[in-house]
């Protein structure tokens, strides 16, 4: 089974900061890496699919990069509505999916 | 507008059974693969089960294999999860989720239904 490791597990940042979250797969997953945002009490929301493709309606301050085993989600200028938990997910081994452990972005 | 609405959650005793339902609308349900994903209180997301559009491919996480059964009724635009031999560790919010393709991951999620396994 492919394991997904996110880092950090949490971070504190200020509005306007540039934030980077990393996700590492235990084996190559090509570009089958997706990112989700989840706010408390809500369902996750797809932000980026296939490593770097922005889902419709998602602000351009979100971007993704990487390939193989190492991937990054970047928020170029953190906004108040971006404080949430972010999850990576591999879909290389679909139907079996694997999520990372999550990164909680908190207000500094 | 795509909508996924789960129902059927509740409190059940260990060893009990429950059936979750997901009503889909706003898209051609029969054209999409579907997932169940769960989230234990205060924890991360865990994939539970997958069913292809025609039900020809079905898959389960090891943690639920042999106890849970996924099914769908394309005529009723509905997805189901039959859960047997429930354990305390099955306590979670269960989300119904749409899979457009291998590349796109999960593009729509329901609001979730809470399953609590406790005596």
Image (cartoon, helix red, strand yellow):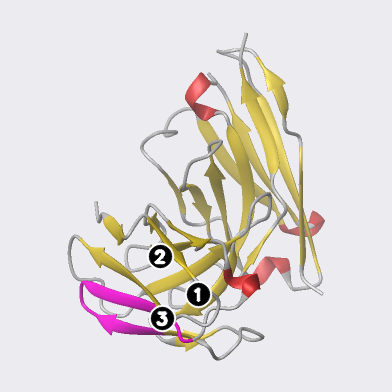
| Magenta span of residues | A64-76
Tag of residue B111: none
Give the spatial CA distance, label 2 vs label 1. 17 Å
Q: Nearer the viewer, mark 1 or mark 3?
A: 3
Q: Chain of mark 3?
A: A
Q: Which residue is mark 2?
A: A88
* Number of other residues with Cα within 10 Å of mark 3, as a class: few under 14, some 14 to 19, many 20 or more: many
Which residue is depicted at the point 66% across and 50% down? B72
Q: Nearest the camera: B76 or B99?
A: B99
Q: Residue at x 66, y 85 (%)?
A: A57
What is the C-alpha distance between the residues marked 1 and 3?
A: 10 Å
The alpha-carbon separation of the residues under discs 2 and 3 comes to: 11 Å
Closer to the camera in the image, B55 or A73: A73
Element marked by disc 1: loop
The numbered mark 1 sits on a residue in which chain? B
Question: Residue B30's spot in the image, x, y percent?
Answer: 68, 66
Residue A69 coordinates in the image, percent (x, y)? 21, 72
Say which element carries label 3.
Answer: loop
Residue sticking out furthest to the top: B119
Above or below B47: residue A95:
below
Q: Circle 1 sits on which residue?
A: B101
Residue drawn where x is 40% and y is 63% of the image = A89
Question: Which quadrant of the figure contains the C terminus of chain B?
Answer: top right
x then y, percent, for residue B33: 57, 64
Q: Are marks 1 and 3 in contact (CB under 8 Å)?
A: no
Numbered disc in front, either 2 or 1: 2
- The picture quadrant where one finds residue A32 is bottom left
Q: Which residue is mark 3?
A: A50
In front: B31, or B45?
A: B45
């Amino acid at each position: 089974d492919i394991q997904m490791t996110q880092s950090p597990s949490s971070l504190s940042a200020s509005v306007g900061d540039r934030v980077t979250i990393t996700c590492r797969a235990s084996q190559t997953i090509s570009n089958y890496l997706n990112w989700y945002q989840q706010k408390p009490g809500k369902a996750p929301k797809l932000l980026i699919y296939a490593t770097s493709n922005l889902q419709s309606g998602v602000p351009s301050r979100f971007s993704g990069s990487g390939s193989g085993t190492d991937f990054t989600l970047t928020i170029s200028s953190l906004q108040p509505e971006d404080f949430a938990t972010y999850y990576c997910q591999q879909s290389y081994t679909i139907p079996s999916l694997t999520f990372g452990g999550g990164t909680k972005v908190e207000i500094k | 507008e795509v909508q996924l609405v789960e129902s059927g959650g509740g409190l059940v005793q260990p060893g009990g059974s429950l059936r979750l339902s997901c009503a889909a609308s706003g898209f051609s349900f029969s054209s999409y693969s579907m997932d169940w994903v769960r989230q234990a209180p205060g924890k991360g997301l865990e994939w539970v089960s997958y069913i292809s559009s025609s039900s020809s491919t079905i898959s389960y996480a090891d943690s639920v294999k042999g106890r849970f059964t996924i099914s769908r009724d394309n005529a009723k635009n509905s997805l189901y999860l039959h859960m047997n031999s429930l354990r305390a560790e099955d306590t979670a919010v269960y989300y119904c989720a749409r899979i457009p393709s291998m590349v796109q991951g999960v593009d729509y999620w329901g609001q979730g239904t809470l399953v609590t396994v406790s005596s």
